[in-house]
Amino acid sequence: MFRQVKRRTAGRRNFEGTYTPRNDLPNHRLSFYDVPPTEEITLEQFESWAIDRLKILIEIESCMARGRSFRETETAVRPLLQKLLPLGTWPVNNNSQIDELKKDYYSHFILRLVFCRTEDLRRKFVRNETVLFKIRYNAMQPKEQHQFITNHHDKLPWNYIDSDEKLALFDQLFAATGATVKSALAAESDGQITTDQLRAHFRNENFIKVPFEKITSLVATRLVLLKLGYGYVPSTLQLSLLALEFQELLQRDLLRTFQSIPRLEEDDRLLPLLNHLGQNFASMEYDPAFSADPSLVSDINAASVTTPAITNHYPLCAKHLQTNMIASSHLRHEGRQQLSLFLKGIGLSVDEALKFWSHSFTSGPHAMTPERFNKEFKYNIRHTYGLEGARTNYKPWDCARILLRPLPGKNEYHGCPYRDLSVDALTTQLGEMGVGAVDMKGVLNDVERKDYTVACTRVFEITHNVQAEHIGHPNLYFDRSRQLERAKTETA
Amino acid sequence: MADPVPSQAAVPADSGVSSSDMLFFYQRLLPFRQIFQWLNHSPKPSKDFTMREFAYEYRTGAYQRYNSFSNLEEFKKSVVQANPTRFEVGAVYSVNPKERKRLPKQALKPLAKELVFDIDLTDYDEIRTCCSGTDICKKCWRFIQVAIKILDAALREDFGFNRLIWVFSGRRGAHCWVSDARARCLDETTRKSIVEYLDVLGSRLNRQGKNLLSLKRPFHPHVERSFDLLKNEFVDIILKEQDPWNTSSSEPSDKSWEQVETLLSYVPEKPLQEELRRKWKLQTSVSTSMSKWEDITVIAKKILKHQNQVNALNEAKKDIILFYMYPRLDIEVSKQLIHLLKSPFCVHPSTGNICVPFDPHHNLSNNEEDDDYGFNPTNAPNLRQLQNEIEVWDVRRVNRDSSQPLEDGESEADKRISEYEKTSLKPYVEYFQKFVNNLLKDELKDSGKRGRDDDTLEF
Ligand code: SF4
Ligand SMILES: [Zn+2]
């Protein structure tokens, strides 16, 4: 797709060589991303950096959609960050670290291009980037945090108050912010905080003074002490203040990016890439590495894929397709495509696939003759495996793709059941999978918000009794499920 | 816009102000120069004045927005010519408001305006017993007086504003104009947050629920300070003067019983509530607010067994004091940048009272009787009275001129004297002038500072 373009850009690489301080890159691990980068990077970098960051944002989005607390999200995202977007240690001191910072910086700006185009995407991007910002700020030592604040005094007119001022205002500070600090403390230590403990904590609490214009919501709710035009903000509220600043800046910049996009669209190299990235928040390509384990594939054959030992690991879409195909001895074109690629993805070889399909189509009350199957459908199955026609090795569809295809009509079973089934039918199906009444509400809420993959991930969590990363691919659902099962039998 | 005037027909003929009275007032009394300086923030005409919107309200009820003037002379000339019943001050815009028709619509963006507040006694109708509707007396003015104390303290001590002035709205309320540069450039979100900070009683909607104050304990320092101010006045203003729970007369009004129910709704513990209600229903002779307030403590002693019940009752009493006396703000006026408000020194069309700026702590009328009130609305300068005073003054001068030989320069001095100086408006104009002078001093300092280190100033 980019071959021709790559050649064009290859000659322009100029990012290699020795490191000299660049003024377009920050020397800090945390950034407001307020200066757009100007150096050139290759299209490969462009794409892979963007995808890595996207993976992180998707994880955040998914955690939040499932009602994870900030702490839980933090725990889920940190290892991913370490793998995909590490930032090294502080202070920044070597060239390889600079490259990490560069990746972070550029990937942020690339995704701005992707997500600036609709209100909805902008909102999601800002929300997830803000959480990422908070996670990173939290991971820093107080010294680095302090330095960050000082470096950005233009945006963050924070003044740390000294102990004399604090002592003089102690009672008023306590009256204004005691309750807030108390609930923050209680959440952290999940226990009751006595007034004495709270007072003791207050003695060590760091307050900053901020112009009241900067903290309107804290002013409106009378959550901070105000004195002569300054609000006194305890450290427990400082992070959200910072996040608010980040969020507002990003919102503004994203709109500006959007307004400058017409110029960008003339760039034929970027447009397809951006479209591809932006297709859907859950549009990550399925990573075959997940199913590379041959020991998991060995028991997949025409006979086993109809047994509960295997079908128990199916996501609802696959279950729905296969059940209805067997019941009616038939499956229309769209459904055939979706199911056979899924089965290919779980490791069903082409020979076993032919066995499976012909058996299903030629037995049962509505069966067709084997001749008809061979004539009309054999080619189709082999085509799926890249053995006919253009010999493309088709990949299993991810949820985004499935959700983009035409809706199923009468007697069709493709698509995503979370979207396509009536609430009643869906409730029945999920009930059979073991989703209880309380959890059902959450799932149906996701469905109502049109967050189908979130609903599906939630069902995975409920039925497997785990906390899971977001699932955006039916085969990923299957593989994760099997991995969990194997882990269990191994420890047992 | 605030304090809307009923149609002309509703104006009683005797106190009504004729258009020739108004013309006289605009030509001879209204201190245009001081108003110009106040809005302009510098001696020479600046954008703060020339791009400022003024609106006229006419006798017919017609309302004309988007007037703007390039200098003091044009301002005065236009008002005299239009002779409106009053004029209102709006925001400073990005372009000249009167030229808006020639410009694209989105060009007319409001940039700045004084932060304003409006307290009106009509919002106290459910609790005041002395008057209702448009009526007002010295007793109910005490609600305004105490409201001013609370808001004044918060605006100065909490928000750090210094240049604020209180203006009589002409009938039953007061406006506050905060002119600090920092206040003028607040965006609407920030204005809204200030209003919500000050609006302790919550929106009108909540107020229907009466005891839904739900203020967190300990009180926020602003609430605590307000409470301290109010608790000292509660006995006088509420228990003695307003006496809202008085059911003494043989047939007490429904309103008093309604108020008694409101009071009871704050009382925690059902048994205590019921015991109090039973007692008060049985009382046939004297049952004042004072005695009821005392009953609560006496009966509570008998009924409440646990210390935490007593504590709850004490907290409830604080809520009652706040509910009955905390300022009731007309919050919409303060939130919007484009909202207009009647200018100081306008004449209230139906009372003829001048909307004078006043010092809430110290009365300017030279009338000892008013000392308790800071400002006494029933003695406010009135157009009719001012006209008399000018007449008297002029007559006296004629007499003096003819009876005494002129000393050198005296007649010159006489000619230079402004008309308002011949009247009881004088101390109010001087008070305003002092306020404006301080404001101008600030602006001068600020512009000097801004010139030196422009980029370090961030709001
Ligand atoms: S969300 Fe994806 S995996 Fe789940 S049912 Fe829908 S299409 Fe299948
Ligand atoms: Zn009254």
Image (cartoon, grey):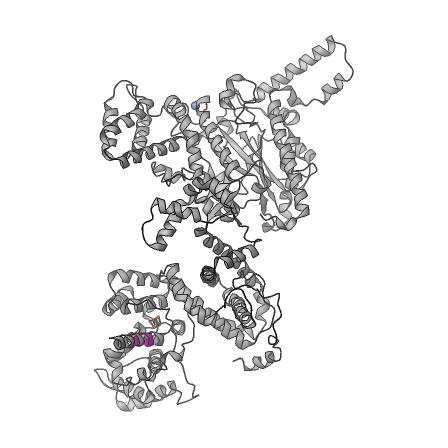
In terms of image quadrants, where is residue B128?
Answer: top left
> Does residue B1 appear in the picture of this structure?
no
Total labels: the figure holds: 0
Residue B318 placed where, x, y %?
36, 33
Q: In this view of the protein, which residue sits in the foreground, A64 or B300?
A: B300
Residue A373 highlighted magenta (yes or no): no
Task: Judge from the rendering whether residue A157 lies leftward or rightward of residue B416; answer left or right.
Answer: left
> Does residue A13 appear in the picture of this structure?
yes
Residue B63 placed where, x, y %?
56, 36
What residue is at 25 percent from the left and 19 percent from the top?
B284
Q: In this view of the protein, which residue sits in the foreground, A255 or A87?
A: A87
Task: Judge from the rendering whether residue B299 lies leftward or rightward of residue B92; answer left or right.
Answer: left
Q: Is residue A471 above or below residue B371?
A: below
Task: Judge from the rendering whether residue B83 lies leftward or rightward of residue A421; answer left or right.
Answer: right
Q: In this view of the protein, which residue sits in the foreground, B139 or B69?
A: B139
Residue B161 placed where, x, y %?
55, 38
Task: Judge from the rendering whether residue A213 lies leftward or rightward of residue A23; answer left or right.
Answer: left
Residue B207 placed where, x, y %?
37, 37
Q: Residue furthest top?
A: B403
Magenta-colored span: A478-482
Q: Is residue B295 above or below residue B323?
A: above
Q: Where ligand 2 lies, by quadrant?
A: top left
Location of the C terminus of chain A by quadrant is: bottom left
